[in-house]
Image: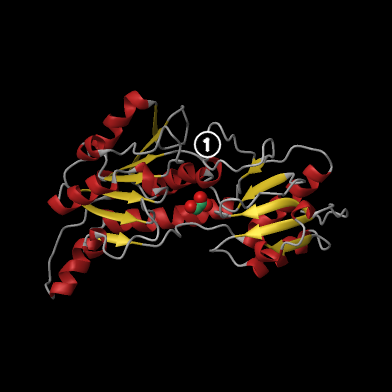
Amino acid sequence: MTTPARTPSGAVAFYSDFDDFETWKKALQAQLPDLRIVHASAIGDPADIHYALVWKPPAGFFDRMANLRMIVNLGAGVDSLVRRDDLPRGVPITRISDPNMSRMMAGYVLFAALRHARDIPFFEQAQRAGTWSYRHPRAPEDVTIAVLGLGQLGALAAHELQRQGFRVIGWSRSPARIEGVECCAGMDALDGVIGRADILVLMLPLTPQTRQLLDRERLQRMRPGAALINVARGALVDQAALTDLLASGHIGAATLDVFAREPLPADDPLWGMPQVLITPHLASVALPASAAPQIAANILRVSAGGVPDHLIDPARGY
Ligand code: GLV
């Protein structure tokens, strides 16, 4: 990407509790050296803000930003932005669409799937008990992995999994094609896909249609002993049902990066389950150096009166 010569008017406001402001500022200014970027805590006149680079900003964040021209969601999933009721009308919202972010996610999914496919949670528990417990490895082609959600992130994860030799089934609401992956589409196909998986991977956006999609009944359709990996959103799943089914052993193990409530409360029973691996919502994160060029290009596009790339549809929810 060549460094654009023009400097857009107005300033960028930054808000995230998880991402480092200085790193983002440096990455964006490497693209647009004269761009003014202010942390949310240092906004002088809100009317000066033309662009907002945000991850879960507090309620009222956009109030009085009368000249806002674009909101950039500092991540892939936009569910937390689109469901709020204080969004300025008509201001385009974009998401980050970064191959490196997809690769980071695919790496996590690959790690988690391989861990389950090779029964590593079983060996971890055996080691803690000090027992030499032999369990014969399964060949990858004997392990069926279903990936629910075949957007940019899900499609790459499905592709990487099939490269490992697993039998991979992909499911999405509308038809998709991924080489080497059996792709199924539509609600009619969902329960069948869930019932065939040894490892079920959730990579769906959270929308009104997908909220609690994995309810108790669907979770019960999982094969006895199958593993669940959720790297998408906690609210896709009935977490109480998941906990019960893990406790009963119907679901054999889980790798959970996302939860109904985050941080996961200290007294949640999931913490104490040895067959559950918990990570604090970081399977993939927005990468400043990698994402800055597309954000800068979008800022320039909008400042020239154009339409930004990677627009999301607030009505659709992704
Ligand atoms: C993280 O959860 C993201 O949506 O980018």
**Residue 240 locus on image (x, y percent):** 24, 48
Query: In what element is the residue under mark 1?
Result: loop
Residue shown at 47% from the left, 54% from the top: 105
Q: Is residue 130 left or right of residue 76?
A: left
Q: Quadrant of residue 280?
A: bottom left
Of the 4 image quadrants, the one containing the C terminus is top right
Residue shown at 73% from the left, 60% from the top: 28
Q: Is residue 37 left or right of residue 209?
A: right
- Three-letter amino acid code at the position of disc 1: Gly
Residue at the bottom extreme, as displayed = 130
**Residue 245 locus on image (x, y percent):** 18, 47
Colour scheme? secondary structure
The local crowd at label 1, few if under 14, some if 14 to 19, many if 20 or more residues have their Cα within 10 Å, is some
**Residue 305 locus on image (x, y percent):** 82, 39
**Residue 249 locus on image (x, y percent):** 14, 51
Q: Is residue 9 left or right of residue 118?
A: right
Task: Classify 285 as above or below 163.
Answer: below
Residue shown at 53% from the left, 58% from the top: 285
Q: Observer-nearest residue: 281 or 68? A: 68
Residue shown at 15% from the left, 60% from the top: 135
Q: Observer-nearest residue: 187 or 125? A: 187
Q: Which residue is mark 1?
A: 317
Q: Observer-nearest residue: 190 or 139? A: 190
Task: Classify 12 as above or below 183.
Answer: below
Residue at the top extreme, as displayed = 188
Q: Is residue 77 left or right of residue 173?
A: right
